[in-house]
Image (cartoon, rainbow, N blue to C red):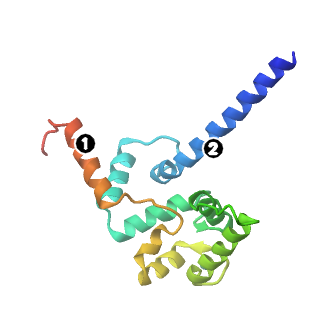
Amino acid sequence: MPHKHRKSAMSGQAKGKHAEKMAKKSHLFRALDLDNDGHLNEEEWVYGMSVLLKGTMEEQQKFCFAVYDLNNDGFVSREEMFHFLKNTLVVQQMDEDPDEGIKELVEFALKKMDQDHDGKLSFSDYKETLKEDDLLKEFLGACIPDAKTKESFLQTISNVYPKVPQF
Ligand SMILES: [Ca+2]
Ligand SMILES: [Ca+2]
């Protein structure tokens, strides 16, 4: 019997890992799923691709902000920043308490970006900061594919659908 017990504990752990992986994957999905119904309909897919591939600066900023705003409350909180930075940064082994370093970075980012000093990042704080430096739009991790990725994506699409009718 202890054997059986052990086996089920392991599969529980595997399930946890799977859920974690899905959660990470879903950051982009969640931002694309505009009506939050858990599915991407055709319009959401087409709109999302057009923002990612050739969106205006503001559309891309809105998209990145939506990715970072995990609970869709319109703000990127300290906790949300922490979540992304923890997953993005390669933590140095030598650090005694790597979380401390990430917390410092969160405070640093807030100090720079929280224009109205309410302790959280609204889209207008974010947008205001990006006026100085648009590269900061992906400060919590890459959201928008780079030019090379876009090109190879479009190439793949046209290989897969060589006979797409031209409208
Ligand atoms: Ca939020
Ligand atoms: Ca703010």
In this orientation, which residue lies closer to the viewer: 44 or 84? 84
Residue drawn at the location 47% of the way across and 76% of the way down: 127
Q: Where is residue 126 in the image (x, y as percent from the top left)?
A: 51, 75
Seen in the picture, residue 80 relative to 36 is either above or below; the reply is below
Q: What element carries label 1?
A: helix
First reached walking from the N terminus: tag 2 or tag 1: 2
Q: Is residue 16 above or below residue 51?
A: above
| Mark identifier at residue 96 | none
Q: Which residue is drawn at 35% across and 57% down?
A: 52
In the rendering, at what x and y percent does residue 46 appear? 33, 48
| Quadrant of the snapshot with the N terminus | top right
Write down the residue under mark 1.
157
Question: Which residue is situated farthest in the right direction here?
Answer: 2
- Residue beneath disc 2: 20
Viewer-proximal residue among 10 and 65: 10
Q: In the image, what residue occupies the spot 44% across and 42% down? A: 40
